[in-house]
């Protein structure tokens, strides 16, 4: 272990003068050392003294005792020595000081920062701190870029969705576009498992069922059906979706419609909840969510919870 990584005499004495003034009690001083990673072996002597006769030792003697042990260690004490310096140089609130010690403590911490900044022996500590800060800043920048892209993608989805309301003369095309738009929205939130697909008879290649999308919610697979109809969805439109669920073990379901549901559909859906988690969504919920820039995952989880816990398959969340 290079001597450069031990506290030089001037810094050692500064620490002895500073640490006792940062805390009001002897117990708080010991706790500070414990939190910096000082071993129990280096603390045991002062802990025994405090337990037997706390008045026989003061805070300055505690600090000198512990720092002497930590400073004579080799590699095993390096982490604690660095952490002690790090915590003191980053000390910003002095509420833990006695009022009479506060100004003195502030001045001593400033001197330690200056010494650490100048001493070659602590160049590595400063470099590590700067590297950690740079790493933190870089992560913040990446997170910000990801959040900005997600917001831009969500705004683009909102604009694409708005164009569908002017396509009354193209109902079939509008229905397919709705599927793509909502699947893209699911993809943005990282929950899309599979886009719309057809299952064909292996012998005749005839399409036997079509599924608009598959997502994973709460660790469970959900088949998604989307319908743009001019009237509330009836049992006739809803039953095929329910049948697909019961033909698949552990499959749950979500139905999204533009103009609500007939009361009979809600009744059928409620009955199915004894065996499957299936809930209903309105397109209006999606539109309002995009306008609020809220979390789609949170909305779906609330609706799923209402279906499971309250036996309510159609909790419409508009705000």
Image (cartoon, helix red, strand yellow):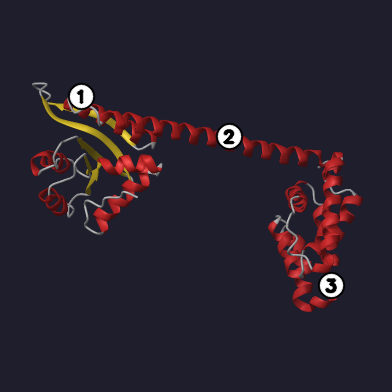
Is residue 218 at all visible to an observer of this figure? no
Mark 3 → mark 2, Cα distance in angstroms: 50 Å
The disc at residue 141 is 2
Instruction: Estimate how packed mark 3 is, as few (under 14), some (14 to 19) or many (20 or more) residues with alpha carbons within 10 Å.
Output: few
Point out the tag, 3 or 2, that comes first from the N-terminus: 3
Q: In the rendered view of the protein, which quadrant contains the N terminus?
A: top right
**In this image, 285 relative to 264: left or right?**
right
Which residue is painted at 71% across and 64% down in the image? 31
Task: Give the mark toward the camera: 2 or 1.
Answer: 1
In this rendering, the answer to whether 100 lies above or below 167 is below
The disc at residue 173 is 1
In what element is the residue under mark 2? helix
Q: Residue furthest top?
A: 204
Which residue is at the front of the view, 237 or 43? 237
The disc at residue 183 is none
Q: Residue furthest front?
A: 166
In what element is the residue under mark 3? loop
Point out the tag, 3 or 1, that comes first from the N-terminus: 3
In this figure, which residue is indicated by the disc labeled 3?
Answer: 57
Which residue is painted at 20% across and 32% down in the image? 211
**In this image, 255 relative to 80: left or right?**
left
**In this image, 47 relative to 185: left or right?**
right
């Amino acid at each position: 272990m290079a001597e450069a990584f031990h506290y030089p005499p001037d810094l050692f004495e500064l620490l002895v003068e500073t640490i006792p003034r940062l805390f009001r009690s002897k117990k708080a001083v010991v706790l500070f050392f414990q939190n910096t990673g000082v071993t129990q072996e280096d603390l045991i002597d002062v802990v025994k003294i405090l337990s037997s006769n706390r008045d026989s030792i003061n805070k300055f003697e505690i600090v000198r005792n512990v720092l002497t042990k930590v400073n004579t260690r080799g590699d095993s004490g390096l982490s604690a020595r660095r952490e002690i310096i790090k915590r003191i140089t980053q000390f910003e609130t002095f509420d833990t000081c006695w009022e009479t010690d506060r100004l003195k403590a502030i001045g001593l911490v400033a001197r330690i920062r200056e010494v650490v900044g100048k001493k070659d022996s602590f160049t590595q500590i400063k470099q590590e701190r700067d590297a950690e800060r740079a790493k933190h800043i870089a992560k913040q920048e990446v997170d910000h870029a990801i959040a900005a892209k997600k917001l831009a993608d969500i705004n683009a989805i909102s604009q694409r969705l708005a164009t569908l309301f002017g396509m009354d003369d193209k109902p079939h095309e509008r229905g397919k576009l709705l599927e793509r738009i909502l699947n893209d929205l699911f993809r943005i939130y990282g929950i899309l498992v599979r886009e719309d697909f057809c299952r064909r008879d292996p012998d005749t290649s005839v399409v036997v069922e079509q599924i608009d999308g598959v997502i994973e919610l709460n660790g469970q697979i959900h088949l998604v059906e989307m319908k743009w109809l001019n009237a509330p969805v009836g049992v006739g439109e809803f039953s095929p979706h329910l049948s697909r669920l019961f033909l698949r073990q552990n499959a749950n379901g979500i139905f999204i419609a533009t103009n609500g549901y007939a009361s009979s559909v809600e009744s059928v859906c409620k009955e199915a909840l004894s065996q499957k988690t299936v809930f209903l969504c309105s397109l209006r919920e999606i539109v309002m969510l995009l306008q609020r820039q809220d979390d789609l995952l949170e909305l779906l989880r609330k609706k799923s919870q209402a279906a499971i816990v309250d036996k309510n398959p159609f909790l419409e969340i508009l705000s």
